[in-house]
Amino acid sequence: MVVNNAGILRDRMITSMTEDDFDAVIAVHLKGTFNLTKHASDHWLAVAKDGGINDARIVNTTSGAGLRGNVGQSAYAAAKAGIIGLTLVTALEMRRYGVTANAISPVAFTRMVGSAGVERPATAGFDVLDPANPSGVVCYLASARSAWLTGQVLRIEGRHLHRMAGFTTAAVYPSRDGERLHAEELVDGVAKLYGVMPTGLDVNQIGT
């Protein structure tokens, strides 16, 4: 069982972001996740090649910034989006060896968030930002009961568990001539794709 959860913040607008700060965030979040995943996967591959049976789990940590982006977090969002990609590929490659790989996206007020100077909002009753809230999900993903689940992202918001579907196709625009897309047709085509093209009567409806 491996849980990758290390992280740092170097939040800045992209115009103020330095290369060193960007590299530091990528190194801790994305490269750190890769390093542990790589060494654990090498071990489990060796077990499988020796005739052993694995029942192994990898749980990575992404975030809403990696799923949707966030102002001032170019490095953090890039790292967390990269962790999703790494999780998906690890799941594909290691499934045959009895290893699952999933990612959680917790909404929580952690020490890392506090270190950025953000004040924790006051709460009464159940604390939706308690960093302990995702623990039950991690325990489930670590258990044998979750052996069927791999390559998934689960977002935890307080008492709610969200099954994320990644970047799904919302609409499709086919080229006019059935071949490559041309820039000229996309003036109207992209507007149609996003549902902002003004609509009018169909030619067959004129006069009705």
Image: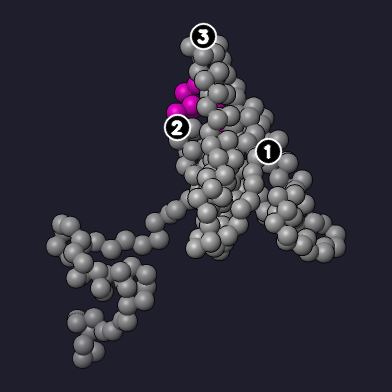
Kindly identify the amino acid type of the residue bearing the numbered disc 3: Gly
Question: Height in image: 48 above or below 145?
Answer: above
| Pointer 1 or 2: first along the chain | 2
Residue 52 quadrant: top right
The residue lying at 62 percent from left, 36 percent from top is 4
Q: Label 3: few (<14), some or many (≥20) within 10 Å?
A: few
The residue lying at 85 percent from left, 63 percent from top is 124
Q: Quadrant of the N terminus?
A: top right
In the picture of the structure, the residue carrying the numbered disc 3 is: 51
* Magenta residues (range): 93-102
Q: Is residue 153 visible?
A: no
| Pointer 1 or 3: first along the chain | 3
Which colour scheme appears in the figure?
one colour
Q: Is residue 206 magenta?
A: no
Residues at marks 3 and 2, CA–CA distance in whole angstroms: 20 Å
The residue lying at 78 percent from left, 60 percent from top is 120
Q: Secondary structure at mark 3?
A: loop
Q: Secondary structure at mark 1?
A: helix
Q: For this rendering, which residue is in front, 31 or 161? A: 31
Residues at marks 1 and 3, CA–CA distance in whole angstroms: 28 Å
In the picture of the structure, the residue carrying the numbered disc 2 is: 92
